[in-house]
Amino acid sequence: SSVLTQPPSVSVAPGQTASITCGENNIGDNSVHWYQQKPGQAPVLVVFDDSSRPSGIPERFSGSKSGNTATLTISRVEAGDEADYYCKMWDSSSDHYVFGTGTKVTVL
Amino acid sequence: DVQLVESGGGLVKPGGSLRLSCAASGFGFSRYAMNWVRQAPGKGLEWVSSISSSSTYIYYADSVKGRFTISRDNAKNSMYLQMDGLSVEDTAIYYCARDKTSMDVWGNGTRVTVSS
């Protein structure tokens, strides 16, 4: 089955841009969704269907996909963006949801 | 307000069973597929199981297939996860999540600890 690979950690200074990648061979054929999880809290959807933003999510959060890689970009990073981020997709070959390995974003 | 509330977690011995519940409110529960997702201590998110709106389609992760059973009662706005043959590897916080293209609403989770 699919494995969604993310970098374990990303560090970014306040006001700068953080980019989190999510790679898998068949990712181009499937919609990718991104979740933010702060310590002790439930995950929150921040991007769905590759690049759409739920209501209430700041425009600073954006998603894109190219080839075998999806990317979550956080512009003008704030201290409150410090969290774990997970990508997710539906693997139709196995009828399984697959979560990425997760990326810890640290704001310096 | 749209809300999901999990319950039924606790401490259980290896080989034991638990039944988790997820109570939905504030939206048309019967129109949505639902999911269980878990997170072991210090680990990432792991999808467990999904059920379609009318229970026609049910899917399980390989790690729980044959041991866990997902179900729902649309009249009670509730979803369930019957967990049998529990092992220490099942220790986790279990979240229920609504499925609307993506998992857009999550509960706060219920903790399951499997230990002797």
Image: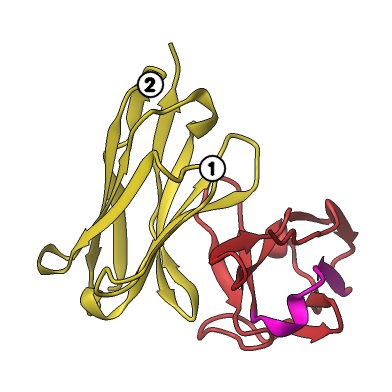
Who's the residue at 10% across and 68% down the image? B75
Q: Is residue A30 above or below residue B16?
A: below
- Rendered residue at 44%/23% (across/down): B114
Which disc, if any, is residue B15? 2
The outermost residue toward the top is B116
Q: Chain of mark 1?
A: B
Subunit of mark 2?
A: B
* Applied colour scheme: by chain
Residue A24 painted magenta: yes
In the rendered structure, does residue B82 fall within the stretch colored magenta? no
Q: Earlier in the sequence, mark 1 or mark 2?
A: 2
Q: Is residue B100 above or below residue B87?
A: below
- Picture colour for chain B: yellow
Q: Residues within 10 Å of mark 1 (few under 14, many from 20)?
A: few
Q: Could you tell me residue A76's position as x and y percent?
A: 81, 77
Tell me the amino acid under the disc marked 1: Ser
Residue named by callout 1: B63
Q: Position of residue B36 (x, y in %)?
A: 42, 55
Question: Residue A60, can we see it?
Answer: no
Nearer the observer, B1 or A5: A5
Residue at 24% across, 64% down: B24
Q: Quadrant of residue B115?
A: top left
Which element type, helix, strand or loop, lies under badge 1? loop
Disc 2 marks a residue whose amino acid type is Gly
> In this picture, which residue range is highlighted in magenta?
A17-31
